[in-house]
Amino acid sequence: MTINGDALPIELAKGNNVALRDLDEELGSVTAVLETTGTDGQPIDADVSVLLLNAEGKVRSNDDFVFYNQPVALSGAIHLRDKIRSDDDDQPVSTDMVTVELDGVPDDIQRIVLCASLDQSLSQTFGDAAAVRLKIRKSDDATELLVFTASDASSETGWIFGEFYRRQEEWKFRAVGQGFDDGLAQLALEFGVEIDQPDGALTADDAQGPTVETSGPGEFIDEQVDDSTSPAPAGRGSQPAGTTMSSTDSPATNPGFDSTDESTTTVSVRRPVRPPKLPSDWNSTVPTDSDTDWQTARLFPVAGIGGAEEQERRATSALLAVMRLVKEFGRSIMKKFGAPSGAVETFIEVPFGLDDQAYRPDGVVRVTRGKRVWTTLVEVKTSDAKLTDAQVDKYVDIARDKGIDAVLTISNQLTGSSDDHPVTIDKRKLRKVSLHHLSWDEIRTEATLLAKYERVSDPTQQRVLEEFLRYMTHARSGLHGFTNMGPQWVKVRDAVRAQTLRSTDKGCADVTSQFDQLIQRVSLDMSGLLGVETAAMAPRNRSDSATRQQQLADSGLLFGSIKIPGAVDRIVVEADLRTEHVTCSVRIDAPREGRAQTRVNWLLRQIPEARDGLRIEAVLTGGRGQTTVGLLGAIRKRPDLLIPTDTREIRAFKISFETNMGSKRSGSKDGLITSVETSVIRFYGEVVQNLRSWNSRAPQLGSSGGN
């Protein structure tokens, strides 16, 4: 596609402008993509922000400021998407995307300014980046329309890339390219946003006032209309040579909001440090195809799947095809095993010869970057099929013989940690060949994180990944993941109740291992729900495993924990096989100042909607085991129930949530797996995601100011 003889995308220089109607007469939605490339393995993580300005060059209210703490405006017409980070070892790329529905922007918004900023606490500047580039794409098919590269950045931590603006009822885009030393706060203040800032920070009165950034000469400048009316904050941008400004287009001097603004609430540009929130529909069921004769056509159909061999072959082909077609998905899977960040090629049933015998692994993945080629054999199992030592051992031999880097196995088996593997191979064979394992649970979670949270840049590839997710969740696909506590579960459960279980029994070790897999399964499900990578905390060594087996034999208890980014502490999960209860708990440090009553009230204010049956334990100074305890309902009425009667102080709170435990070994409604998973999700949504650590205030100067 060409515009006026120029092929898309059009490379804009600083000051150039272009009418969007010349790019596409019916262009109503675009996506602005900011790519910031680091150097020497050090990422430069820029944050996009958008300012919606009226005719006076100011926001109408704080709602017209879109950034990481306020990602949506105009009922979704402006939407800041989740950040995408590459894993390039040398030049990592951070990508921010903003969708702009131009048809949904009201008439009193005259300009849509696209900005970027850096976290000033990291002591990074845009000059440190290998490249900083803005791309404008069509939202419907991701066609790149415009590209603007910031080529003159130095010490700036804030940057205005460009703006959409109206001329004669038409939208145009201008490349601005102007930087600032005071980051996001200065950008917002200059355009009329009321910022909640600590004492001594930059204020609007400190600003230099707006200057005019005019249009430079360029191929796409409108010759009939002067577009030199782009007020921008004072900074390092310079006016391109040979440009003029119309006196009738000089910027307005009103520093405040539009007269229609009634908001006096400030917004904070402090970067959020808080646990992610559960989506409101976390408990909804996945829609399935109708059972009528009218079946929706699917990219990855389950119709026609016969026996186990056909199920396995179809799963292998679907997975490897999606890894090749959806580049973010293929790279996210392969990076776990040391593959370079490069082009992914996939093959199925590739023949190999070894010792005069023919072998056909289920697949081969080859990743190429420059002159480096990394290859792995792939062995896949579905449903209840198990990997065998002999088969995997033979593929390791083939890899050693052919100079292949790794062997990857995939099944519904979960391992307690990334270092474990379901089969046992002579470690001497693994000196030159690495052995890895993936569960379908892990693959499904990786696909969910990319698809659900829109981390795939190409919309067609996004749809392919969504179709693959649907295929994996279908019962006939055989990709159900971890759904069974194993054949020893019932025997161990009954032995615990009869108090006849010994820590040396084979079933004791099997059940503790299965429980580790269950905790990992729950952690993966939480990752998909929250959009962040959570971690199941597995035993560190064999001694830990032996201790847990002894606990199961002595007291009937199984333990695990899940770490969630931003949460005050890890969630501890306990299953009591004797009382048949599941308990989730979390610990939060109490404030280090104030009276005991103040500390209790501080906790109660954070969980106003939590159920009365929560158990609250106040951990006291003066030695281990010193606590006061009560149920939340009673403590709400009498906070003094947690206050010690002596001079000891409350140093922490432990909050616990207890539910009935399913006794079946499967993932059915009455099974242990479902009861543990539901308990963790509900406890997180009701309690953990609402808790914030105590932050003491900085000491205050007296009224004399220290003089």
Image (cartoon, grey):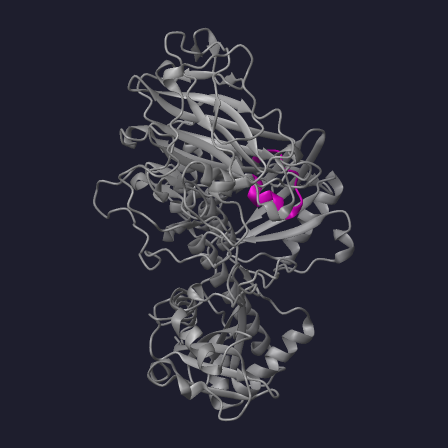
Identified at 60% across, 45% down, the residue is 120
Q: Position of residue 123 (x, y in %)?
A: 65, 44
Identified at 51% across, 68% down, the residue is 694
Nearer to us in this view, 495 or 440: 440
- Up/down of 474 relative to 682, above or below: above
- Up/down of 577 relative to 230, above or below: below
Residue 89 on the magenta span:
no
Nearer to us in this view, 453 or 161: 161
Q: From the image, which quarter does the N terminus lie in?
A: top left
- Res. 329 in view: no
Identified at 57% across, 70% down, the residue is 513
Identified at 50% across, 43% down, the residue is 185
- Up/down of 414 relative to 598, above or below: above
Q: Position of residue 158 (x, y in %)?
A: 55, 36
Q: From the image, which quarter does the C terminus lie in?
A: bottom right
Query: Which stretch did the figure color magenta?
Result: 331-346
Residue 268 falls left or right of residue 559: left
Residue 339 on the magenta span:
yes
